[in-house]
Image: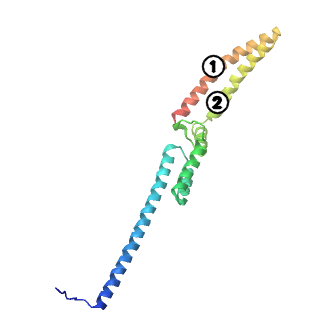
Amino acid sequence: MEEKVSKTAEELLVENELLTQQLTDIGEKLKNIGAILLDGKEQNVKLTYAVRLFAETHLTRDEKLAIASEFDRASSAEQVERIYKKYMEQIAPPGVEIDAEFLWSPGFSRNLEKYYFQYKGYNPFDIIENAANVIRTQFKLEDDLRLTDDPEKIKTLKEAWQEVRQASGVAIDEIISVTNEVLKK
């Protein structure tokens, strides 16, 4: 059986060009879709590491904005991972064990100090330092007592030691109280 060809060579040539163009267009669209998917994957990696860093640490608003900007500029998953590691090492240096509740950036720590100083009316670090000085004085008096043989000096040192000993007990309580208040926040 012989089939009759209903299209001329010229019509077949036009149809071939049309189909070739459609195939080219489909190939371009697939490339564009591939680029969109790759971009989506990169954005997802950036978002994942940013959320992880923000969730695992305490950062200031400015630090979060700077980190987000740095993640945005990253052009590969490897760069994003390096940025994450850089910030984590600044907050928790390798080899230093820090409880997850205390992964504070330097800026967050400064803001915490300002909070206590401005809004609580005192600087807990000064209170701890003053209390530690009282305790140091007690130890100094004890050392002086051990090293002297002069009975008059021993009597004076014992009297001073009795007074400082009571103040040391109060100082220890102050350190514990301030530490507990800071840890509650």
20 up-or-down from 64: above or below: below
Q: How many badges with numbers are in the image?
A: 2
Q: Which residue is drawn at 39% across and 69% down?
A: 30
Quadrant in which residue 28 is drawn: bottom left
Q: Residue at x 58, y 38 (%)?
A: 116
166 up-or-down from 46: above or below: above
Kindly indicate whether the residue at mark 2 contacts the one at mark 1 (C-beta within 8 angstroms): no
Q: Would you say 98 lies left or right of 138 here?
A: left
In terms of secondary structure, where does tag 1 sit?
A: helix
Quadrant in which residue 9 is drawn: bottom left
* Position in image of residue 131 (x %, y %): 66, 26
Give neighbour class at mark 1: few <14, some 14-19, many 20+ (Cα, 10 Å).
few
Q: Would you say 170 lies left or right of 30 here?
A: right
Q: What residue type is labelled 2?
A: Ile
Q: Nearer the viewer, residue 49 or 79?
A: 79
Q: Mark 2 points at which residue?
A: 128
Q: Which amino acid does label 1 sit on?
A: Gly
Give neighbour class at mark 2: few <14, some 14-19, many 20+ (Cα, 10 Å).
some
In space, the residues marked 1 and 2 are separated at their CA atoms by: 13 Å
Q: Mark 1 points at which residue?
A: 169
Q: In which quarter of the image is the N terminus?
A: bottom left
In terms of secondary structure, where does tag 2 sit?
A: helix
* Position in image of residue 91 (x %, y %): 58, 43
